[in-house]
Image (cartoon, rainbow, N blue to C red):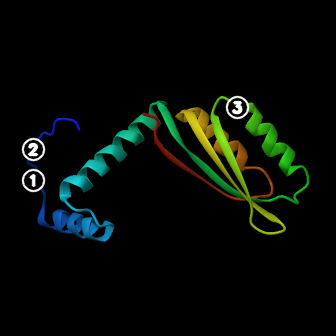
Amino acid sequence: MSELYRFGISLEKTLIDAFDRHISAQHYKSRSEALRDLIREELLKKQWREGGSVAGAIVMTYDHHKRELLNMLLDIQHDFQETIISTQHVHLDHHHCLEIIAVRGTADQVEKLATQLKVQAGVKHLSLSISTAG
């Protein structure tokens, strides 16, 4: 584990009360753990904005009976083979499928892939979850 540093901060009572409610609702063991997560989240957002390397998952549902949709989705995925690590395909019912796509690359490339998939007619929902790549 890295060397730990202690520091003090001053907050308004209303802000610390709201933070403590957040900590309790999220089941954090301490303010330090919650604050570490908030800092990591902000640093990840900065990394995303600056086009840094990220990893994540694209989760989408779609109607596989939509004409030419499967071919279009596969063509897009082949265009991003450097970004896609793996995919998992799940049949939800006779008409609908769930696809989970593990991705790693620049934030711009990952977002471009997600956008190209999302705008296809027949894609019911798509969400992108990102994390740090290292």
**Farthest front residue in view:** 1
The three-letter amino acid code for the residue at tag 2 is Phe
Percent across and percent down for residue 14 are 17, 67
Horizontal relation, residue 29 to residue 9: left or right: right
Percent across and percent down for residue 21 are 24, 70
> In percent of the image, x 76 and y 38: which residue is there?
76
Find residue 7 and name its label: 2
**Farthest right residue in view:** 67
- Name the residue tied to disc 3: 81
Percent across and percent down for residue 37 are 31, 50
User: What whole-number distance in Å separates the C-alpha atoms at marks 2 and 1?
Assistant: 10 Å
- Name the residue tied to disc 1: 10
The three-letter amino acid code for the residue at tag 1 is Ser
- Nearest-to-viewer mark from 2 and 1: 2
User: What whole-number distance in Å separates the C-alpha atoms at marks 3 and 1?
Assistant: 48 Å
> In percent of the image, x 69 and y 50: which residue is there?
88
Q: Considering only vertical position in the picture, is 131 above or below 24?
A: above
Judged from the image, the secondary structure of the residue bearing numbered disc 3 is loop
Q: In which quarter of the image is the C terminus?
A: top left
Horizontal relation, residue 55 to residue 45: left or right: right
